[in-house]
Image (cartoon, grey):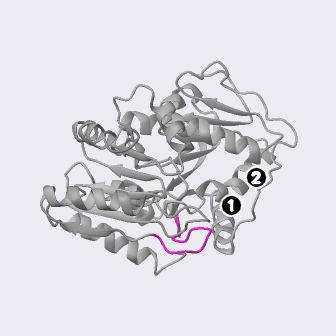
Amino acid sequence: MAEKLEDIHADCSEYTMQYPLTKFQEVVSKECQMHIRTQDVLLECVCGAGKTEMVLASIADALNENRKVCFAIARRQVVLELSERLQIYFKKAKIVAVCGGHTDVLDGDLIVCTTHQLYRYQGQFSLLILDEPDAFPYRGDEVLHGIAQHACIGHVIYLTATPDSYLLSKVKEGTMRHIVLNKRPHGHDLPVPRLFIYPSIILFYVLLRWINEHACNPRIIFVPTIKTAKRFGYILSTLMKCYVCTSESENRDTIIHEFKQETNGIMIATTVLERGVTIPKADICVWHANHSVFDEAGLIQMAGRAGRSFTSPEGDVLFLCSEKTELVQFCKEKIEQANHVCIV
């Protein structure tokens, strides 16, 4: 547990944005800003809607009142990236990233940390923002859940595109405010997955054709297992340059960084990349989307990697299935429904 944190610096609540919020983002931002003073808030926004930008006003309010704020995230890489973004927004604030390999400095005006690191801050935060609370390792982990609850003496903003049953139950009980936004800043609809249901041998030919058809863009191929990732990496590397990223990849940060430098590279990944990583203009393919390792949230998150760029807002999403399943069809229909209801 950390010692009592120091007071925040004067004027650290001032923030600037490169682009103004859209009218829909502005509505959500003000709703969140108003309700977080009296209750927890579930901010359910589609992937790429700009969740971080919509909580800046709530963060600024807390800092302006000398209240400590923490942004907690499941994955280390996202902690480092988000801390850099927040430092650009809050130029006068001391933004501190706390995660594996970055634990020398624990105090700042705004702390960005992995959920595991919250154990250091018992009773320290007036505002806690939990990003992707439905994701591993936070989801279903009672220990992490308890640590987060003990770290916050005020209220919590939960940010996710795919809320789990626990969060929705809190909304139903009336103990949590639910705010929904189904529109990205560029105003285009979410890419709806195209489904192909064939035997695996035919699916592989469909995959190769898709790779060639989208040769001008970065392509991410999600696969259900590490074994499949390695096998695809070996096969495709004989034809073109490709990257492989799994939970076994020791240099994962380097792999992601190098792939981002490519204008039309290929990444073969397991679910480790389903959240938190944005690749401009990326097209997405999910191999064996019907596999049991993929759940509703994961499929929606993977599809949400496409169409996020202002210069390429359409994107393409392909679900390759060896058999028809209700889950895959449900995910497609849920994305279609989101395109018809913008804000709740």
Q: Name the residue located 61 percent from the left edge and 65 percent from the top edge.
A: 311
What secondary structure is found at the residue carrying circle 1? Answer: helix
User: Are discs 2 and 1 less than 8 Å apart at CB?
Assistant: yes
Mark 1 = which residue? 33
List the single residue furthest toward the bottom. 340
Q: In the figure, is residue 302 to the left or right of 344?
A: left
* Mark 1 residue type: Gln
The x and y percentages for residue 28 are 63, 68
Q: Which is more N-terminal, label 1 or label 2? A: 1
Mark 2 = which residue? 61
- Taking depth in this image into account, of 216 and 98 the one nearest to the observer is 216
The x and y percentages for residue 10 are 87, 39
- Taking depth in this image into account, of 131 and 215 the one nearest to the observer is 215
The x and y percentages for residue 193 are 35, 68
- Please tell me whether residue 294 is drawn above or below residue 332 in the rendered image: above
Number of labels in the image equals 2
